[in-house]
Image: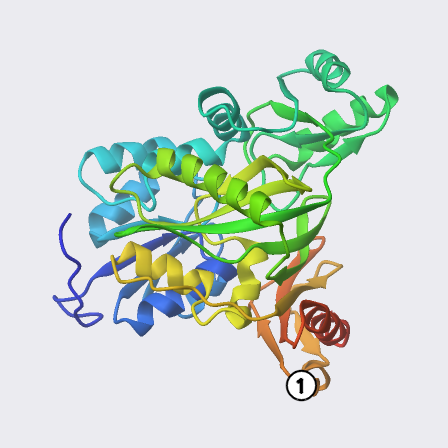
Amino acid sequence: MKKVRFGTPLKSSATKLLLLGSGELGREVAIEAMRLGIEVIACDRYANAPAMQIAHRSYVFPMREGAEIRKVVEKEKPDFIVPEIEAIATDTLVELEKEGWRVIPTARAVRLTMDRQGIRQLAAEILKLPTSPYRFASSLEELEAGAKAVGFPCVIKPTMSSSGHGQSIARKPSDIKKCWKFAMEGTRAQTGKVIVEGFINFDYEITLLTVRHAKGISYCAPVGHIQIDGDYRESWQPHPMTKTALKKAQNIAKRVVGNLCGEKGRGIFGVELFVKGDMVWFSELSPRPHDTGMVTMVSQTMSEMELHVRAILDLPIPEIPCKPGASVAILAWKSMQNPTYKGIAEALKIPGTHVRIFGKPEVVGHRRMGVALAIGKTVAEARKKAMAAAKKIRVVG
């Protein structure tokens, strides 16, 4: 693999990183890359997305338009193509990789994980990893049969969505029709297909941030989190686990990440797992920094975004120390065209707290607009401080 050149942005010596998707996680990736002298080009479906506000250049077009992605790639000639969202023209990425362009972590990883059917079948049917019972359905009738097979209550999700969009719980057969309609309205692409999953009686769920780098695979301390309707609201690190459960979690992550990356893949993965005692089940995976991992901006000396960039650039990744930290999402609950923020000064009066405002230009419905972060002597203390800080901040328009 060609050694990365560290040059100067906007000069012929520059190394270029092209972001496909420019949200809050992409913004932090851009910051980490720019700290190392990387030239960043940000793309998204709307203007003034968070990463665009700091990138050297930006382009606005739908991320599922493969011809537009190719046009920008051929114009900019990036050294690295870094997808930051799920809904993207993966067939084009596969073609570009075959032509010699570097897709992070790999085009195959992006393609398989964009669709819940691809990653679930890889995990359960090829790698034989433990998962919840599941079925796929392309019609209301198939969903009714699938729900009956996995049992009630069950979780129903579009095969392609993010941040909980289209996800709901069917507690009885009469809920199925409403859940089908909700999934079809919340899908990121019109696949016309859902996954229905049986419930696992787990004690807790974690994200195991797993880094594939030049020297192998490294793991961050487990991140505990709370999601409501599939959307991240709170996370903390480290989450306590038994040694047996942690070893099983790392083995699951190693097997799936290793399969997706092969020898050449690089980057961080958010591997979501269910845990009960010493038992661990694979849930989902993101081939990029994970929203629950925003806690690492205070809990680790190297955030998940810095680890992602280091892995991409084949830079050393030493041990990843962790101290008790927590994050709480700051939400806007109504549509607005000119969001403003109140209470930031009050939030920052709490010792050991930090605030990150994402800079999203508008809100349609409700939206995650920032995050409150805190460290403490214990995870419980950090969570209490982060929650108190988040409650002091209001998004108004």
The residue shown at (47%, 54%) is 289
The residue closer to the viewer here, 223 or 189, is: 223
Quarter holding the C terminus is bottom right
Q: Is residue 260 left or right of residue 49?
A: left
Percent of width and height locating residue 286: 49, 44
Name the residue furthest front.
Answer: 243
For residue 360, say whether it is visible.
Answer: no
Q: Name the residue carrying label 1.
A: 351
The residue shown at (65%, 42%) is 275
The residue shown at (57%, 72%) is 356
Percent of width and height locating residue 271: 52, 44
The residue closer to the viewer here, 108 or 66, is: 108
* Rendered image quadrant of residue 65: top left
* Rendered image quadrant of residue 224: bottom right
Q: Please tell me whether mark 1 sits on a helix, a strand or a loop.
A: loop
- Crowding at dot 1, Cα within 10 Å, few <14 / some 14-19 / many 20+, comes out as few
